[in-house]
Amino acid sequence: MRAMRRIPIILALAASVLYAAEGPLDLHAPEIKLWPGGAPGSEGKTAPERWIEGATPDAFHRVTDIHNPSITVFLPPKGKANGAAFIVAPGGGHRYLVMDLEGKFVAEKLNSMGIAAFVLKSRLANAQGSTYKIEKESLADTLRSIRLVRSRAKEWGVDPARVGVMGFSAGGQLALLAENHFDDGKPDAADPVERLSSRPDFAVLGYPGIRDWKTPVEKTLPPTFIYVNDDDPLATGAAEYYLELRKAKITSEFHVFRRGGHGVGMTGRTAEFKTMPESKWPDLLQAWLTDIGVTPK
């Protein structure tokens, strides 16, 4: 991994009260641990993950206290699959992960485009009592997930040269970090997964949780798609980041919609989403992926 630079980041803020639907969410899909023998940095941490329960104005499911990170596998129908894949990083202020709105629902939308999706359950720096750090364990989980998908690409019908990362809010921050701090793999690693590159082939940042961005980016970054709403106070650094991508001549696209707020995923928080212009952003994404050669025309 390249040397980590300090970058100005604001964590996507969680609500003052932790709302969630009752009980855990069954994703009805295979869950694969990133490190079958346990994640480096989580030694001795055996407490089970916890689904936050309580009164729920939005009915979405949130999980926290993650010590054994994983990906959940969502594959499109074989007749529709086009070989492209995304690691999907849900948001939640690094306190929890919104596993349906910014995970399962996103995966299902991508599957409808013929794209495989792998929903990341990463370790959380702001969970109660956590000792993890965003730029260490959380980023390591994101990069490991890219390697893992490449290592099993044939099994999952994925082209290892078309593996991208997509994140929302705090997950958008992880996607941003991943495209800035990848490595080419370690050829002499005992673990064959670690021999593979962690560079995402493309990146999608959904309202990434950054307030400002003044750090130049390198010319090795992959093509990047950014989507925000103008009335979102938690992703105000997205425009500055886009300008840095332009300076570095990184193929990129930046969309700003007039309203919609924060935390809407690909399907929205309410039925009103379908009537709003921002609901078209998945169509713009699909057109962009085709334009850069990731998906077929």
Image (cartoon, grey):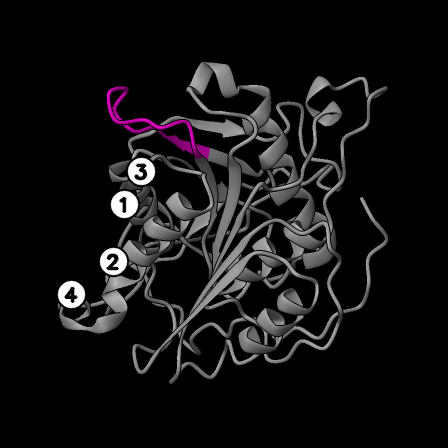
Amino acid type shown at disc 4: Lys
Labelled disc at residue 274: 4
Which one is in front, 141 or 2?
2
Per the image, the residue denoted by label 3 is 297
Residue 190 lies in what quarter of the image?
top right
**Residues under numbered marks 1 and 2 in contact, where contact means CB atoms less than 8 Å apart:** yes
In this rendering, the answer to whether 233 lies above or below 271 is below
Asked whether the residues under the numbered discs 1 and 4 touch, taking CB atoms below 8 Å apart as contact, a structural biologist would say no
Q: Amino acid at mark 1?
A: Lys
Percent x, y for residue 232? 42, 81
Is 94 included in the stretch rendered in magenta? no
Q: Gap between marks 1 and 4, in whole Å?
A: 14 Å
Kindly identify which residue carries mark 2. 267
Q: Earlier in the sequence, mark 1 or mark 4?
A: 1
Residue 206, above or below 184: below
> What is the crowding at mark 1: few (fewer than 14 residues within 10 Å), some, or many (at least 20)?
some
Q: Which residues are magenta?
A: 72-84
Say which label, 1 or 2, has the lower sequence index. 1
Tally of numbered tags: 4
Q: Which element type, helix, strand or loop, lies under badge 4?
A: helix
Q: Measuring 72% from the left and 49% from the top, which residue is drawn there?
A: 220
Q: In the rendered structure, which disc, 3 or 2, sits on the residue that comes first in sequence? A: 2
Using residue 22 as the reference point, say whether residue 227 is left or right of it. right
